[in-house]
Image (cartoon, rainbow, N blue to C red):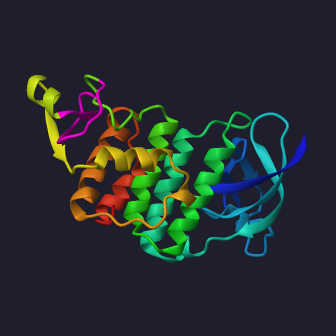
Amino acid sequence: MIYNTEGIVIRSIPYGETHAIILLLTPTGTVSAMARGAKRPQSKLRAGTQLCVEGVYTLYQNTGMGNVQQFELKNSRRPLREHLDLAAYAAYFCELVSSSAEERPNGSSVQYREFLAVLDRLALRNDEPSDISRIWEAKILRTLGAAPNWEQCAICGRRCESSTRYSTADGGFICDECSQTANRRSILVPRGLPILLNRMTKAPMERLGQIRLTEPTKRALLTVLRAQLTEFAGLSLKSASILDSLDIS
């Protein structure tokens, strides 16, 4: 079967001296394909194997892995490969989405559009990359079913309105009363963090506007979201370690 699909490269692995295996995120899910000869300097497929490149792919697929027949470029997103910090974040975002997206044809067009929007936002550099990272982590947690209702106490279910603490054991925030009565190890987070996280999780990227976070809020978001990704989504990502080693997470 030969078909055309919009897609964006979320993984690219050299195969032999001249070929590449790519993983595409498409509006209907992920698909793996071999781009034969793509590593040759004059190959018309070369551009279509670079991370975060968006285009229209003509794929031939019988059983198993497909083959890239043609490629038409829509958006190269060169800044995401030319700057070290942006490249590190882009790789992290790609690894997150590849860990959560369904295979074609069971994928989500909403996730596809959100991923394009988050990469475009990263490339524009109007926001701190670390702030965009927190938004994408929150959305991935929801996709994986590992995000609670951030505004409700994870123990009693009541709305967290006063001082709030995050409990790793409960996978969410706990209210002031429960933090005093329950035997839980928890950390105090800035007031308003539950509302912020709910908004980051549910609001489309284009509705979020420009992001301005205080340093305490940044630190709390990093702690909470990384704990949720590790303990409740079961993700331990190599690209996250790279971000941490560069001290830009």
Image side of residue 27 versus residue 129, left or right: right
Q: Is residue 59 above or below residue 37?
A: above
Image side of residue 158 versus residue 136, left or right: left
Q: Residue at x 77, y 65 (%)?
A: 45
Say whether residue 100 is magenta.
no
In which image quadrant can residue 68 be found? bottom right
Q: How many marks?
A: 0
Image side of residue 221 versus residue 46, left or right: left
Image side of residue 23 versus residue 40, left or right: left
Q: Residue at x 74, y 41 (%)?
A: 65
Give the quarter of the figure containing the N terminus.
Answer: top right
Please identify the residue farthest to the right as the structure is shown.
Answer: 1
Nearest the eye: 230 or 194: 194
In which image quadrant can residue 206 be found? bottom right
Nearest the eye: 1 or 212: 212
In which image quadrant can residue 187 be found? top left
Residue 55 lies, in percent from the top left, at 75, 62
Q: Residue at x 48, y 76 (%)?
A: 83
Q: Main secondary structure of the magenta part?
A: loop
Residue 17 lies, in percent from the top left, at 67, 62
Q: Is residue 103 visible?
A: yes
Q: Is residue 241 above or below residue 179?
A: below
Residue 166 lies, in percent from the top left, at 22, 38
Residue 47 lies, in percent from the top left, at 71, 69
Q: Is residue 11 visible?
A: no
Question: Which span is picked out in magenta?
Answer: 157-175
